[in-house]
């Protein structure tokens, strides 16, 4: 899409449509799947209007569900803006690897890169556009329930491993369908 076409699209959008692009819903609210998230999933369903203009979906299981979600959304979205399909790919997708904290203990960027490459390939085949990974927080309080998602409490190891993961997962060209965007997370 050219810059001019993008500007024209943004100019044509209502405030509600723009705000809707910031909304992310759980795929289980639209299609049956085995993946559950915590919270009131299914108790508070998004409105039909929000479903038409939402920007992203998470917790789908496979390429068939990704396609079904995208088809359902595009059929109702007035601007035909595709959904971003997002997943938490913390230590692999179909092939699972040691948790990031254990990978950090290896001090091996090359090993982490091999694992990230497999996760990238599996994710792109499943229709994932964005993964919530890497987690680069230098978590030092073991009481935090998601400390396992960091590579280390040491900033240098975290930055090296996080950079390696982003480099492999995103590649040089995000328009390549084999690459997946990273959402670096838990900066607090």
Image: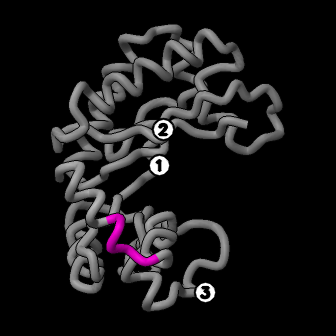
Highlighted magenta segment, given as a residue range: 10-14
Task: Report x, y in % for residue 137.
Answer: 66, 30
Which residue shows up at 35% across the image and 67% down it? Answer: 11
The answer to whether marks 2 and 1 mark residues whose Cβ atoms lie closer than 8 Å is: yes
**Distance between the alpha carbons at the discs numbered 3 and 2:** 27 Å
Q: Check if residue 12 falls in the magenta segment.
A: yes
Closer to the camera in the image, 174 or 128: 174
**Distance between the alpha carbons at the discs numbered 2 and 1:** 7 Å
| Picture layout, residue 119 above or below residue 166 | below
**Image disc number at residue 15:** none
As helix, strand or loop, the secondary structure at mark 2 comes to loop
Task: Report x, y in % for residue 38.
Answer: 63, 67
Tell me if mark 2 has few (under 14), some (14-19) or many (20+) residues whose alpha carbon lies within 10 angstroms of its own.
many
Q: Which residue carries the number 3 mark?
A: 44
In this rendering, would 176 be left or right of 22? left
Task: Report x, y in % for residue 119.
Answer: 32, 37
Closer to the camera in the image, 22 or 40: 22
Q: Quadrant of residue 75?
A: bottom left
Closer to the camera in the image, 136 or 109: 136
Which residue shows up at 21% across the image and 31% down it? Answer: 173
Q: Which residue carries the number 2 mark?
A: 133
As helix, strand or loop, the secondary structure at mark 3 comes to loop
**Image disc number at residue 88:** 1
Which residue shows up at 67% across the image and 35% down it? Answer: 187
In this rendering, would 70 be left or right of 188? left
Q: Quadrant of residue 177?
A: top left
Which residue is most to the bottom? 48
First-in-chain label (2 vs 1): 1
As helix, strand or loop, the secondary structure at mark 1 comes to loop
Q: Main secondary structure of the magenta part?
A: helix
| Picture layout, residue 185 above or below residue 34 | above
| Picture layout, residue 61 above or below residue 50 | above
């Amino acid at each position: 899409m050219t810059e001019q076409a993008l500007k024209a699209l943004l100019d044509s959008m209502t405030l509600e449509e723009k705000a809707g692009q910031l909304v992310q819903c759980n795929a289980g609210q639209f299609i049956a799947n085995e993946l559950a998230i915590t919270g009131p999933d299914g108790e508070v369903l998004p409105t039909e209007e929000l479903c038409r203009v939402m920007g992203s979906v998470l917790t789908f299981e496979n390429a068939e569900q990704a396609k079904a979600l995208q088809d359902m959304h595009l059929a109702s979205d007035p601007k035909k803006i595709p959904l971003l399909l997002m997943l938490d790919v913390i230590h692999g997708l179909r092939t699972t690897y040691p948790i990031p904290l254990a990978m950090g203990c290896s001090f091996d960027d090359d090993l982490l890169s091999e694992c990230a490459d497999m996760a990238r390939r599996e994710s792109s085949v499943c229709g994932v556009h964005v993964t919530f990974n890497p987690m680069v927080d230098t978590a030092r309080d073991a009481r935090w329930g998601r400390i396992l998602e960091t590579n280390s409490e040491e900033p240098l190891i975290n930055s090296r491993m996080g950079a390696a993961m982003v480099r492999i997962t995103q590649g040089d060209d995000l328009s390549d369908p084999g690459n997946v965007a990273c959402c670096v997370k838990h900066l607090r």
